Amino acid sequence: MAGSLIASNFEKFAAIFSPSLTGGAMNLVFRPTTIPEVSGTVLTLNDITVENVIAYLKSLVLTTKQEHPVFDVLPEEVKPDEVKNSTYIIELIILGVAFVLTLGLWIGTLVIPCMFCCSKKKKDSGGNSSKGCLIAMGVITGVLVIFLALCLPLVYVSISSLVAGIDGKAKEGESSGLKNTVHVVVNETSLFLKDIPVRGRRVTTDLLVYLQTDLTRSLSKLVKDILKELLVRYNVRKLMDEATTLSSGVSRLQTLIDFVKSTKTEIVNGIKELKKKMDLLQKKLQTDMEQLCGHLQTPQRDQCNKLLEKIKAMKLDFNETHITLSDDLIQIISTFGTNLTAVLNKLTNLETKLDEQIESTISQIESSFNLTQELQPMLQLWDNLGTEVSDPVIQQLNEIEPTVDEALTTAAKFTKIGGFIILVLFTVVLIIILVFGIIAAVQAAKDSHGPKCCLCCGLILPVVFCFLIPLLVLICGVFVLLSGIITNEGCRYVGNPSGVVVTDGILNLYLKFLWPQLLSDKFVDPSISVMLDIPVPEDVLDGILMKCKSSETRDPGLLPSLGVDHFLNATAVTEQPEYKKAITDAEEVLVTKIRDFDFTSLLPNNLDEIGKPIKDLERILGSTTYEKLQDKEQLEAPIREVYKSAVDETTNILITLLEKSSSGYARNVLKCGNINAIVTSVIGATCVSDGLINRLGGFFFMMLLYLCPLLLTVLFYQIFLRQSAKS
């Protein structure tokens, strides 16, 4: 906890001198460039040389107004509202003053023993003033010793914190040490690289199988549509529909005829019986009317006689031919129905055979049209990536990891040993001051003096242990300055949300230049690159740090997290020579199959026997051109026309499928949980508030704060001893 507090306070101290978020060290790494291939200004890598680094540090530290070439070309929405330059020169002045003062104190600690040991005077005649000065020096020295003794544990804590930052894991859940981070990076990188070819090939295969299935389904439907279109094109389908309708009508007419024939005799006999009864009734009515008319007077008799004449004139005769069908009509209808039934049977057989031909044609086209083989370079890409990239990198990481691990372990050991030596030296100096101070105080109280050589030893021994303090102060000052610069000009741009925005803005401009080159024929096989359409990733760091966070149920894709929502150039895929050849081959298979189909054997050959009803049917249909189905040359023309039109539609469907599935492909082909773990581990180990950089700066800052008071304490202690010798 205390180590994290020291590191966090150092970060706050370093932030005092930091500039605004103006790009930091990325102004050294990148440079603005204008190239014809890309619109607008982009960023390219700068030449990192010793001269460039020195010039950059001079501009950063020794001036208060710096140039920010990279920051100047960033979009306005990325830049901070107010730009403040760095004040590292003030920090440098403070550290310089601290060094000069330390050097002066150190010189003083050398001069006083020399003056005392070489002087022949043993006692000062000052009296009371010497006593007062002695007491003052003793009090000051005692206070400083107590202060240093209390601060010594903080030095130990800062050393332990630095060691924990290098080797192992700090307590109470603080950031992981650099050694642990190396293991995490190696493990996660190995997992990621191993997963790339396996996942890439699996996802690509699933995509191709999906496309193959859907495309062959579309082609199968196309074959069915073409063969059925032939029947429609030559009005055979309409003929079949109308013939079916006519057959239904003829069937109803035949039923009526059969009904009439079966009920004819019964109806005629009933009518004859009715006629007899009606004749009797007519005669009786006539007799009754004659009697009635004889009793009537004129003019009623005249009217009655007229009615009587009408009754006599009424005839109830029935002509059987009115309800009897002609035998010729019955024969014609029967023959027509028989012939039409034969035609319908032929046409039904035509449809059955046509369906069988369709299934045979579809099977042959599906076996010859293999999209997986046509897009084999996409699968080969993942195999090459595994053998040429993943495996060598993993092998190299496994070889490097023990070396790095051993180096970090050694660094941690040396840090521990160095820290232990420093603590021992500090403790020895404090003990010397304390022991000789007590001796001097006791002798002063007894008003006695020890041997001069003893006092000389008391004066010289602390100097012996402090002879490297100016060098240590200089080293500490340099590391404090460098740690602060790294924190402000580097770590702020990966650990601070506002800094991440600036970093992403810079990386966006760099990727705008780099991405077309990565996808060029120089790095990617032309047979593959022509099928790729990967947009330039955007906001890379934010995507990795925030959008790539995985859980037990969710591991977002790397490409979508970087703004890449598609992967394939669907149009280019359909323009591939292999794809076009497969389409052409399928067309030839279809044409050949249909040309070989014997429509003659299946078409009705007795259509002419139907006679006038068929002519009437032809008049209804217009021109029935089913006979063209017997002409191979005329048959082939519409096949190619319909096929090409339908293939264009199928290709458009394929493009839509590719664009749709490409989004899922981009999401699944690369997982980013490993990348997130790698980046967050590295940032957590180095750049967070209690990361290694701030721990390193905090350690040297604590050393700097301790060394100056320590040297001042030695100086006051020497003055105290010298004063005690004079009193």
Image (spheres, rainbow, N blue to C red):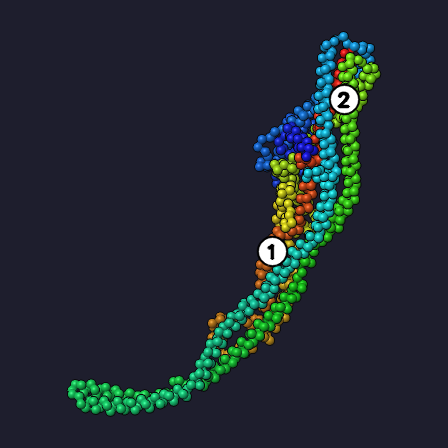
Tell me: 239 left or right of 482.
Answer: left
Q: Which mark is residue 311?
A: none
The reply to whether the C-beta atoms of the residues labelled 1 and 2 are less than 8 Å apart is no
Residue at 59 percent across and 33 percent down: it is 80
Label 2 neighbour load within 10 Å: few <14, some 14-19, many 20+: some
Residue 605, picture quadrant: bottom right
Q: Which residue is mark 2?
A: 434
Residue linked to disc 1: 657
Is residue 174 among the parts visible in the rendering? Answer: yes
Residue 112 in view, yes or no? no
Q: Residue at x 65, y 51 (%)?
A: 668
Q: Nearer the viewer, mark 1 or mark 2?
A: 2
In this rendering, the count of numbered labels is: 2
**Residue in the picture at 72% in, 10% down:** 129
Residue at 50% over, 82% down: 335
Q: At which x and y percent is residue 45? A: 69, 37
Picture quadrant where residue 266 is located: bottom left
Where is 59 relative to 184, above or below?
A: above
Q: Is residue 333 left or right of residue 108?
A: left
Disc 1 from disc 2: Cα separation: 85 Å
* Residue 346 rendering spot, x and y as whole percentages: 56, 76
Q: Residue furthest left?
A: 298
Q: Quadrant of the C terminus?
A: top right
Question: Dot 1: few (<14), some (14–19), or many (≥20) neighbours within 10 Å?
Answer: some
| In-front residue for pair 480/137 | 137
Please state which amino acid type lies under the numbered disc 2: Leu
Q: Residue furthest front?
A: 446
Give the SS element for disc 1: helix
Residue type beneath disc 1: Leu
Return the x and y of residue 537 as percentages of the image width and height: 63, 44
Task: Judge by depth and name the residue closer to the eye, 611 or 581.
Answer: 581
